[in-house]
C-alpha cells in the first residue's frame, strides 16, 4: 500500500471535494482526478503556446520530419 499522509484543508474545500465525488469515490479519488485534469490543462496550454511560438522555418522542419516518420511507418507495415 502507498504511504499516506494528512493534509489540512478548510471545511469549505473538503465539502467542495465531497460534492464533486461520485458514489463510492473517496476524497483521494476526487483529488487525483482534479490533479489529472489540471496537469492535462497545463500540458495543452504549453503545447498551444509552443505552436504559437513556432517559426515558419521550425514548422517547415517539423513537417519534413513528420513526413519522414510517416514514410518510415508506412514502409514498416
Image (spheres, helix red, strand yellow):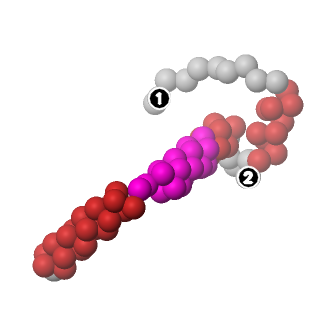
Marks 1 and 2, Cα distance to the nearest angstrom? 23 Å
Q: Is residue 43 magenta?
A: yes
Name which residue lies at 74% across and 52% down. Answer: 23
User: Residue 45 in the image: x percent, y percent?
Assistant: 57, 50
Q: The residue tagged with tag 1: helix, strand or loop?
A: loop
Closer to the chain start, of discs 1 and 2, is 1
Which residue is nearer to you in this view: 48 or 10?
48
Name the chief secondary structure element in magenta. helix
Q: Is residue 11 magenta?
A: no
Name which residue lies at 13% across and 79% down. Answer: 75
Which residue is nearer to you in this view: 15 or 35?
35
Q: Is 16 situated left or right of 50 in this image?
A: right
Number of callouts in the render?
2
In the picture of the structure, the residue carrying the numbered disc 2 is 22
* Image quadrant in which you'd find residue 64: bottom left
User: Residue 59 in the image: x percent, y percent?
Assistant: 37, 62
**In the rendered image, the vertical position of residue 49 relative to residue 73, given as above or below:** above
Residue 42 in view, yes or no: yes
Residue 73 in view, yes or no: no
Name which residue lies at 19% across and 76% down. Answer: 71
User: Residue 14 in the image: x percent, y percent?
Assistant: 79, 32
User: Residue 15 in the image: x percent, y percent?
Assistant: 84, 36
Which residue is nearer to you in this view: 25 or 42?
42
**In the rendered image, the vertical position of residue 62 relative to residue 11, given as above or below:** below
Magenta-drawn segment: 35-55
Dot label at residue 2? 1
Amino acid at each position: 500500500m502507498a504511504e499516506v499522509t494528512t493534509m489540512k484543508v478548510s471545511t469549505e474545500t473538503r465539502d467542495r471535494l465531497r460534492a464533486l465525488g461520485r458514489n463510492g469515490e473517496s476524497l483521494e479519488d476526487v483529488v487525483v482526478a482534479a490533479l489529472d485534469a489540471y496537469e492535462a490543462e497545463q500540458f495543452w496550454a504549453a503545447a498551444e503556446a509552443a505552436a504559437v511560438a513556432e517559426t515558419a522555418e521550425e514548422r517547415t522542419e517539423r513537417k519534413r520530419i513528420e513526413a519522414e516518420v510517416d514514410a518510415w511507418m508506412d514502409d514498416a507495415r
